[in-house]
Each structure stands twice: as structure tokens, then as C-alpha cells.
Image (tube, rainbow, N blue to C red):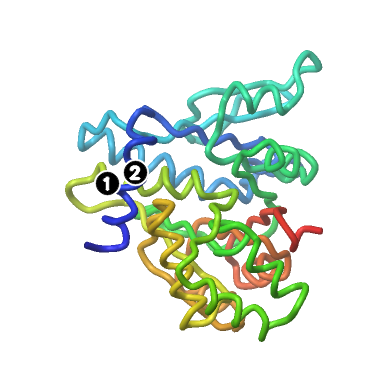
């Protein structure tokens, strides 16, 4: 049984009752607000999501698909060829959180840090986007990369590292090797990706990656056990032992990379990779 197979047995009961997975993205992340000839930093990711939905249509898969909701403060007419399922125009009558409570997204993307922090505090997976130059990617496959601690996992081990140092962290992971970590803020989005992957009988257009600073050995073992326990299926995992993430991300070429440390997000951006900052836990303080 592969890691994905083991994970799927744990996540199907909850997710199989859902017919779609909502991704909410603000116009400031999807479109460049200053230059109409430049698409926003979230554009390639949403375009790849469209591609996945098209493949599901071709295979006549009706169960479990992405629903894209554009959140905007103005009337958005030109979406540059993207398939947007719904457009929600923010008004003074409702707060952003009320909109999110209505939508219940598995992922919320925005360039506004306050709204992202509010969404995470309310229990939604969310990340801050940064308008910058990025490498154009092919749309043959949606590639999503995640950090582990503070993103797919909780930040409990990260706290040990921050408060007591590397040696204490390594000892902690060895002592608690069989105790899985709690799920992190992007856990539900990762489960949704796995659920959709399992709908394809032929070539799957979705691939996921774990790119973590954790070492091999006990930190890696605890990470794998956490992935399996929570149904966080990942296709490939890279345990870098503290090495810079930028070069491996450049090689992977994900449409988006989620990390809870701004320095790692900056490293991704420097290599032309769209990095999204997840302001969660001890690293966001």
C-alpha cells in the first residue's frame, strides 16, 4: 500500500460526501491591480485548477471537483479566459468572514495579510500572496508544494525548535516518533487534492510535494506517520535538513508553494516560484 492509498482510506468518509471544494481568491491576488496587461500571482494556479476540472469533465467525473470563487470589491468583468464559478462582490453589509462562512472554502488566497490571518484564526486554510515576477509554467499538471510544520502539520515541534534549539527538536522527534502531530491549516486542502487524485482512472493531472526543513531519521518518520494518520496524501517528499528550499522548488516547478516562514517564501520567490505565506503558529509571531 502506498502512502496515498493509506491516506485515502482515512479521508474518504468525510470528503466523499462533498461534491465540490471551494477555493476563494481575491481579485488583488488573481489580477494585477496596477497593470491590466499583467496577470496576478495567483493566476497560474487558478488556471491549472481550471485544467484539472476540464480533465474531470472529459473523464465524466462528477464527484469532487474544484469550485473557484472570486472575491472582489468592484464589479469584475474581464477574467482573462478563466473559468470562475462565482463572483462575490464585497459590500459593507457583510464582513469578509461572513462571506467565508457562507462559502466554507478549503483554501483562501489574498494579498491582504489581515484578511488571511482572520481566515486562519477562524479555521480556514489561507495564505498571503505577493505580487512579483514568476516563471510561466505549462498547464499539463497542477503541482502544489507544501511545507510541513505550521502548514500540513501543527507547529508544536516548531515551537520546541524555536524555544530550545535544534538538539532539543531532534530529541523531541525521536522521543515522540510514534505520536502523530495535529493537522495544520492547509490539511483540508491537501485532503481535497488527494480526493480528486483518486477520481482519475487514467493519468492524474495533480501532483503534490512536501518540501520540509526536517531531517531524515526520526523527524522524517514522524512526518510520514502524521501524513498517513490524517489522510494528507503526498506524492513526493523532500527532507532537506535545513538546506535552502529555493533550488529544489525551482526544479519541481510548482504552481504554488505554501510555507509558514517568510524567509522560505522569499527564497521561493527569488527562484521564480510562487510562494504563499501561511501566517500560522510560532513562526508568525
Q: Which residue is the site of mark 1?
A: 198
- Does the rendering let one see residue 123? yes
Indicate the quadrant where residue 114 lies: top right
Q: Residues within 10 Å of mark 2 (few under 14, many from 20)?
A: many
Residue 212: give x, y in percent of width and height: 54, 71
Classify mark 1: helix, strand or loop. Answer: loop
Q: Which residue is the site of mark 2?
A: 195
> CB under 8 Å between callouts 1 and 2?
yes
- Which residue is depicted at the point 64% across and 56% down? 276
Classify mark 2: helix, strand or loop. Answer: helix
Q: Nearer the viewer, residue 87 or 76?
A: 87
The N terminus is located in which quarter?
bottom left
Specify the label residue 209 is tagged with.
none
Q: Nearer the viewer, residue 123 or 66?
A: 123
* Extreme-bottom residue of the structure: 167
Q: Is residue 147 above or below residue 247?
A: above
Looking at the image, how many numbered discs can be counted on the residues? Answer: 2
Residue 170: give x, y in percent of width and height: 60, 82
Residue 144: give x, y in percent of width and height: 47, 57
Q: Is residue 30 above or below residue 160?
A: above
Residue 69: give x, y in percent of width and height: 55, 29
Amino acid at each position: 500500500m502506498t502512502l496515498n492509498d493509506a491516506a485515502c482510506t482515512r479521508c474518504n468518509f468525510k470528503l466523499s460526501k462533498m461534491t465540490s471544494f471551494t477555493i476563494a481568491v481575491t481579485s488583488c491576488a488573481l489580477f494585477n491591480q496596477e497593470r491590466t496587461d499583467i496577470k496576478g500571482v495567483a493566476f497560474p494556479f487558478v488556471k491549472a485548477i481550471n485544467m484539472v476540472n476540464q480533465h474531470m469533465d472529459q473523464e465524466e467525473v462528477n464527484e469532487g471537483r474544484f469550485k473557484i470563487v472570486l472575491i472582489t470589491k468592484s464589479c469584475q468583468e474581464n477574467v482573462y479566459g478563466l473559468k470562475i464559478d462565482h463572483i462575490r462582490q464585497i459590500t459593507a453589509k457583510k464582513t469578509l468572514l461572513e462571506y467565508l462562512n457562507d462559502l466554507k472554502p478549503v483554501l483562501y488566497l489574498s494579498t491582504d495579510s489581515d484578511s488571511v490571518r482572520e481566515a486562519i484564526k477562524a479555521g480556514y486554510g489561507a495564505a498571503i500572496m505577493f505580487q512579483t515576477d514568476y516563471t510561466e509554467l505549462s498547464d499539463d499538471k497542477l503541482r502544489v508544494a507544501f511545507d510541513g510544520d505550521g502548514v500540513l502539520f501543527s507547529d508544536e515541534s516548531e515551537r520546541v525548535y524555536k524555544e530550545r534549539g535544534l538538539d532539543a527538536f531532534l530529541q523531541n522527534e525521536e522521543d515522540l516518533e510514534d505520536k502523530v502531530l495535529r493537522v495544520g491549516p492547509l490539511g483540508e486542502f491537501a485532503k481535497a487534492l488527494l480526493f480528486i487524485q483518486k477520481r482519475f482512472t487514467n493519468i492524474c493531472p495533480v501532483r503534490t510535494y512536501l518540501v520540509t526543513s526536517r531531517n531524515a531519521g526520526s523527524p522524517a518518520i514522524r512526518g510520514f506517520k502524521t501524513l498517513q494518520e490524517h489522510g494528507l496524501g503526498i506524492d513526493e517528499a523532500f527532507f532537506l535538513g535545513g538546506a535552502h528550499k529555493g533550488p529544489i522548488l525551482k526544479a519541481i516547478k510548482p504552481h504554488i508553494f505554501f510555507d509558514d516562514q517568510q524567509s522560505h517564501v522569499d527564497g521561493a520567490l527569488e527562484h521564480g516560484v510562487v510562494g504563499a505565506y501561511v501566517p500560522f503558529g510560532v513562526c508568525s509571531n
